[in-house]
Amino acid sequence: MIAAVAAVLVVVPAVVLLLGERGPRAVEPEPIDGVVEFAGTTGRPVPGHVEYAQTPPVGGDFSRSPIACGVHTREVSPERAVATLARGAVWVTFDPDLPEADLAVLQALAPRHDFLLASPMPGLPSAVVASAWGLQLQLDDTSDERLEAFLDAYQQGPQALIPAERCTQP
């Protein structure tokens, strides 16, 4: 009986600590200069193509199949990327002609940010755009310190529609 009580006293706090570190945060992050909020962003899983109000999208209807996080070198389906946003990812889109040094920064960020999805997208309003559900930050390059602040603040943040413990893997 004593061993069972001791095990509960050790195991329960450890599980709570681990879940607290992995799960979505309920605390609102500190404001980041330049972040634009798109209020009332709703979404639901739908089949087929979706027209979005923003480029890149920050929410709306989405595919039932999210895309795996990581740095992609080819364009990804916006519907699948928005499904990943709904699950707490930050989607960093970048100009297809982004310099290799900037792409290397994204590659270096990926291991530290499990919910980072990055992919090229033509026709962006700036060279790099970081998007979370209902939020967006336009940047000139990946060396801007606000990029990592955005990742820290919004990956698995309170804005996520469908909190997930991990980003979909291929």
Image (spheres, rainbow, N blue to C red):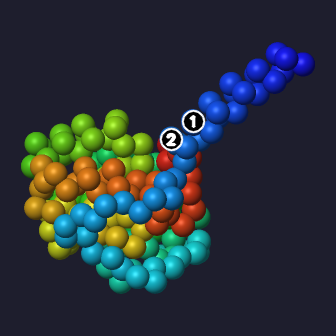
Q: Residue furthest top?
A: 3
Q: Which mark is residue 18?
A: 1
Task: Tell me which corner region of the image, top left, top right, bottom left or bottom right, holds residue 19.
Answer: top right
Residue in the foreground of this view, choosing between 110 and 18? 18
Quadrant housing the N terminus: top right
Closer-to-camera residue (32/39): 32
Callout 1 crowding tier (Cα within 10 Å): few <14, some 14–19, many ≥20: few
Find out whether the residues at labels 2 and 1 contact each other: C-beta distance under 8 Å: yes
**Residue occupying image coordinates x 50% and y 48%:** 167
Answer with left or right where residue 27 lies relative to residue 122: right
* Circle number at residue 97: none
- The residue carrying mark 2 is 21
**Which of these two is toward me, 165 or 15?**
15
Residue 10, relative to residue 115: is it above or below? above
Q: Which residue: 29% across, 57% down?
A: 150
When the figure is inspected, residue 11 is found, relative to residue 155, above or below; the finding is above
Crowding at mark 2 (Cα within 10 Å: few <14, some 14-19, many 20+): few
Amino acid, disc 1? Leu
Q: Residue furthest right?
A: 1
